[in-house]
Image (tube, rainbow, N blue to C red):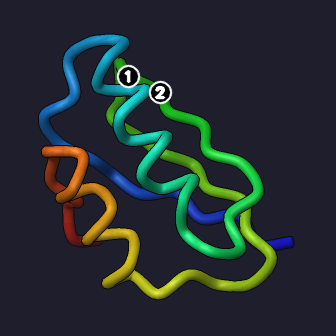
Amino acid sequence: MVTTTYQVQGMTCGHCVSAVSAEIGAIAGVDDVRVDLASGQVTVSSESPLDTASVRAAVDEAGYDLVDA
C-alpha cells in the first residue's frame, strides 16, 4: 500500500470534496481518498505509486488544480 499526499487548489465546499474524491477514486488501483478541505490536502492510498499525470487529469476533470510539489 502506498500513501501519497497532493495539494489541490480551488476547493471551497463539500461539493468540491466530493468531486475531487470521486474523480481520483476512479483511477485504477486507488483504494482510499481523503480530502482535508481546510488545507487543500488530498491523501490517496493506492496499490502502487500513481502516475502524477493521471492524478492531475482527475483533479482537472473535477474542476480544480493540482499544485506542483
Residue 45 to residue 42: above or below: below
Question: Which quadrant is home to the N terminus?
Answer: bottom right
Q: Give the x, y percent position of residue 40.
A: 33, 35
What residue is drawn where x is 42% and y is 51%? 23
At label 2, which amino acid type do we have? Asp
**Which residue is tagged 1?**
37
| Mark 2, secondary structure of its residue | strand
Tag 2 residue: 36
- Tag 2–tag 1 contact (CB < 8 Å): yes
Quarter of the figure with residue 27: bottom right
- The image shows residue 36 at horizontal and vertical percentages of 47, 27
Residue sitting at x 38%, y 79%: 54
The local crowd at label 2, few if under 14, some if 14 to 19, many if 20 or more residues have their Cα within 10 Å, is: few
SS at mark 1?
Answer: loop
Three-letter amino acid code of the residue under disc 1: Leu
Q: How many discs mark residues in the rendered view?
A: 2
Q: Going by the image, does 34 lie left or right of 10?
A: right
Of the numbered discs in the image, which one, if any, rests on residue 54?
none
Q: Which of these two is toward me, 8 or 22? A: 22
Residue 21 horizontal side relative to residue 4, left or right = left
Tell me the distance, in whole angstroms, between the alpha carbons under discs 2 and 1: 4 Å
Q: Which residue is outermost to the right?
A: 1
Which quadrant of the structure image shows residue 17?
A: top left
The residue lying at 50 percent from left, 33 percent from top is 35
